Amino acid sequence: MIDYFRVAGGLFNQLQDTQQAAIGRAADHCASSIGAGKLVHLFGTGHGSFPGWVSSHRRAADHPPPPCVR
């Protein structure tokens, strides 16, 4: 079990070291879009679709989820 956490921690460190700037730029673009009253489209495949699926259900209860997550 200790090896799992060591390896997983190393992968997260690698992700932070190599992708932090790109993730920050994406977050800035999303924040600018939301701040301007525009949309942010979330998508993915397989387990990668979960962020888009979960966020769509946190909207107002009287709006059905978009067709892609029904």
Image (cartoon, rainbow, N blue to C red):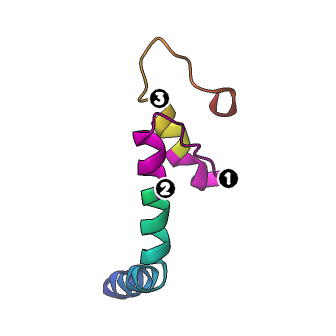
| Mark 2 or 3, closer to the camera | 2
- Using a 10 Å C-alpha cutoff, classify the residue at mark 2 as few (fewer than 14 neighbours), some (14 to 19) or many (20 or more): few
Seen in the picture, residue 53 relative to 50 is either above or below; the reply is above
Residue drawn at (44%, 76%) of the image: 21
Q: What's the magenta region?
A: 29-51
Q: Amino acid at mark 3?
A: His
* 46 shown above or below 68: below
| Residue ranking furthest to the top | 62
User: Residue at label 3?
Assistant: 57
- Residue at the front extreme? 36
Please check the rendered image and state whether residue 18 is part of the magenta-colored stretch, yes or no.
Answer: no
Q: Is residue 60 above or below residue 48?
A: above
Q: Nearer the viewer, residue 53 or 41?
A: 41
- Judged from the image, the secondary structure of the residue bearing numbered disc 2 is helix
- Amino acid type at image mark 2: His
Pointer 2 residue? 29
Disc 1 is placed on an element classified as loop
Mark 1 and mark 2 residues within 8 Å of each other at the beta carbon: no
With 3 as the anchor, is 63 left or right in this view? right
